[in-house]
Amino acid sequence: MMKISVLDIVHQTMADGPGFRTAIYCAGCDHACPGCHNPQSWNINNGHWMEIDELMEIIKADSMSNVTFTGGDPFCQVDAFTELARRIKAETTKNIWCWTGYTIEEIQADEHLSQMLPYIDTLVDGPFILAQRDTTLLFRGSPNQRIIHLTPVEEDVCPGAVELVKPR
């Protein structure tokens, strides 16, 4: 059974995406962005290991909340987070927002990392850049970070969201 190193689970948060959300704060991040708001998340050993079944029970118990993957960087545990995202999509109607220090271009160029993208509705990508810190931005800390809607189902209106145009 796959496990995820989890720092915390925040229930019915509105800070980690639109509407009520169950936010899974994972441990493990290779980016180590200066000024990170969550540096304790860098070390994967700072979390506690939870089975995907256990996380699914928590997610399904809140019928009102969608799901957020954050941390840390969920792409540092991409195999387990892909399985969790696949289960969420198969067993619920919840949408998934995911924060990462990778850019979408880096993820798409890596076959291993890109396995999670089909299950993510909205990706907030890019490292936090302290010199560009902007506390007025919605759901991100610096303007290089993009809110990218990956599915047509995701229709949240978010200032700063970008639309990806697929190459022909």
Image (tube, rainbow, N blue to C red):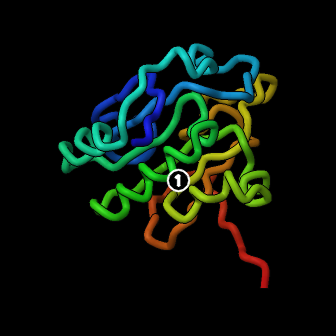
Which residue is under mark 1? 158
In this orientation, which residue lies closer to the viewer: 36 or 47? 47
Q: Where 119 sits versus 123, above or below?
A: below
Q: Position of residue 149 (x, y in %)?
A: 56, 61
Question: How many numbered tags mark residues here?
Answer: 1
In this orientation, which residue lies closer to the viewer: 117 or 111? 111
Q: Residue at x 67, y 49 (%)?
A: 146
In this orientation, which residue lies closer to the viewer: 148 or 58? 58
Q: Residue at x 50, y 73 (%)?
A: 152
Q: Quadrant location of the N terminus?
A: top left
Q: Position of residue 105 (x, y in %)?
A: 78, 56
Q: Position of residue 163 (x, y in %)?
A: 65, 66
Q: Position of residue 133 (x, y in %)?
A: 72, 27
Would you call the spot at circle 1 few (<14 residues within 10 Å), some (14-19), or many (20 or more)?
Answer: some
Judged left or right of residue 95, residue 163 is right
In this orientation, does residue 24 appear?
yes
Residue at the extreme bottom of the image, as rendered: 168
The image quarter containing residue 148 is bottom right
Amino acid found under the numbered disc labelled 1: Cys
Judged left or right of residue 58, residue 111 is right
Q: Quadrant location of the C terminus?
A: bottom right
Residue at the extreme front of the image, as rendered: 1
Q: Where 60 sits versus 35, above or below?
A: below
In this orientation, does residue 37 appear?
no
Q: Callout 1: helix, strand or loop?
A: loop
Q: Residue at x 29, y 45 (%)?
A: 56
Judged left or right of residue 38, residue 56 is left
The image quarter containing residue 53 is top left
Q: Where 20 sits versus 40, above or below?
A: below
Q: Residue at x 46, y 52 (%)?
A: 83
